Amino acid sequence: MGGVKGVLTALLMGRLGYLGLVRSPHYQTLANGNRIKLQIILPQRGLIVDRIGLELANNTTNYCLTLTLEQVSNLEETLRRIDQFISLSPKSIETLQTEIKQTPKFKPFILKNNLNWDEVCKIQVNRPELNGINVEMGYKRHYPLASEFAHLIGFVQAPSDHDDVSEELANLPDYRIGRTGLEQQYECRLQGKAGYREIEVNAHRRVVRHLRKIESTSGSILNLSLNAELQKAAFQRLSEEKSGAAVVMNIKTGEVLSCISTPSFDSNLFVNGIGHEDWNTLNNSLYTPLTNKAIQGVYPPGSIFKLVVALAALETGKISPSRESFCKGFVDVGTHRFHCVHRTGHGRVDMVRALQMSCDTYFYELAPLIGIDCIADMAFKMGLGEKTGIELPNEKKGLVATRSWKKMKLNQSWTIGDTINASIGQGAMLSTPLQMTMLMARVLTGTAVIPTLLYQNNRDAVHFSGLSLNPGNLEVLKKGMDACVNDPWGSAYASRIEEPLHKIGGKTATSQVRRISKFERQTRVLKNEEIEWKRRDHSIFAGYAPIHAPLYATCVLVEHGGGGGRTATPIARDILWAVQKEQKT
């Protein structure tokens, strides 16, 4: 028996020695895990500023009231006690209970955001009686010019289960990630790096002392090319119409100075979770306020596309700008009649005059002479049919119709009627307002201008590759656009600027939405005001300023706004006037 006791004693001492010496670090780690807790310190999200440093997205102090379900013994009683001190929300206690129970027990549930100081004091004084209740101080994303920049800046939201975010960060009540626009595009740059603090707690999980703190690193500042004052002025002007888009670009650097889509929305609504009523209003609107029409709206470019056709014809060397055509108001091709914008015709016109008065017949006759292949190649060269590469997610690339596209999409062969339709930017041709602005910039410079939303610190270092275009041919297009606005017979003459140093040029377009029937042409073509809004023509103007030394290009599109010279052109004139007067750009 003594021997057995000795063996057992030896085994016991050996086990104690093994646990005390060999396995000591392991159990020390486990003990520290119970004794030491890590609290993540969220970084402040990087500021987004315009070209002169005006804040477009910043951070404001936010006190929020949270509840952790695993630390609460009686949920209903706790909620009712809190409701005695502060009004939680318009929701009933029963509704809050349901939402809280759907949240993981360990994850803090936000009962109320944006507590004022009186509410914070009331909660803190009564906190010993409110287990599981905490007041968290953090930062909330704020957009000072929310409506004007909603589509560009975007907004942040709490991460969902589908987002690639660590569980530790996702469980923090203040953690937000970029959901749309530049907030999404530059998430890594804006997010910053989280810090943490080590705290020692007792058996009841109460804080005993702070051990160590590693500060967070704020996100980087995003300096944009946008001009906030110009953006506000352009937004106010375009908002006079039901729906539309406008872009202003510096043609030398590619910097986008203004990019508007209307109607807009208040991006601050999304930061802490948008309400059902607000969401339904935005989501069900006929005017699609959640869509950035400048880069996601695709429209037939209409007569803006005549610039591409004219340039393609001149570059072949087969067509002279002095070539004339007699416009009698229509062209017959086989059994089909293609009508000009002017029903009685424009008479004898050359290329400059055709651009000036937006004569369809001239281009109906011109396009078949060079063919769709030549036209499509020039369209691609001028940046149509492909994404521009601007620093925004979900940009649409539009469409340049080709023989191969029609064969693949419709399993049909290309016809001369398709070429004629394409010659005036109708049929299967689709472009975004940003693409049409870039087209204008490339026509004016002869280089492959690429738009950007980032401020170019060294403007002299911005060089775009040449497009190998004949400068003389580009001058012909400029003469046509000059005459379009500044000649009494021009389609945009009513919106000219008289001051010599600020004169503008450009091209009007009426983008047809509905097909006009033969019967309607024989009787009376209905005016846009006589048909429902969704079936009216789009109004477009692409232009530039000043005439003597082009620096700014723009495209204004008014959805279902009717004639380009009547609706979009006056808006573009006002915007080009504003950008020339704004010396900071």
Image: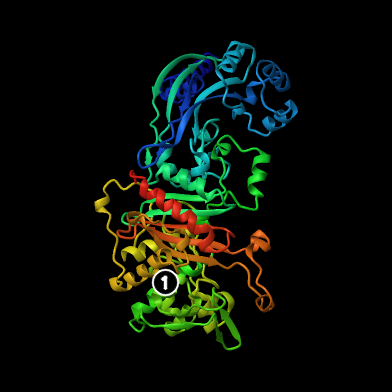
- Coordinates of residue 542 in the picture (x, y in percent): 44, 61
Q: In the rendered view of the protein, which quadrant contains the N terminus?
A: top right
Q: Which residue is mark 1?
A: 308
Dot 1: few (<14), some (14–19), or many (≥20) neighbours within 10 Å? many
Relative horizontal placement of residue 291, taking residue 499 as reference (left or right): right
**Badge 1 element:** helix
Instruction: Name the quadrant containing residue 412.
Output: bottom right
Relative horizontal placement of residue 226, taking residue 428 as reference (left or right): left
Above or below, comparing residue 239 to residue 33 in the picture: below
Seen from this angle, which residue lies furthest bottom? Answer: 334
Residue ID at (42%, 71%): 308
Above or below, comparing residue 233 to residue 300 in the picture: above
Instruction: Name the quadrant containing residue 50.
Output: top left
- Coordinates of residue 384 in the picture (x, y in percent): 44, 66
Residue type, mark 1 in image: Val
- Coordinates of residue 374 in the picture (x, y in percent): 41, 78
Residue ID at (60%, 15%): 123
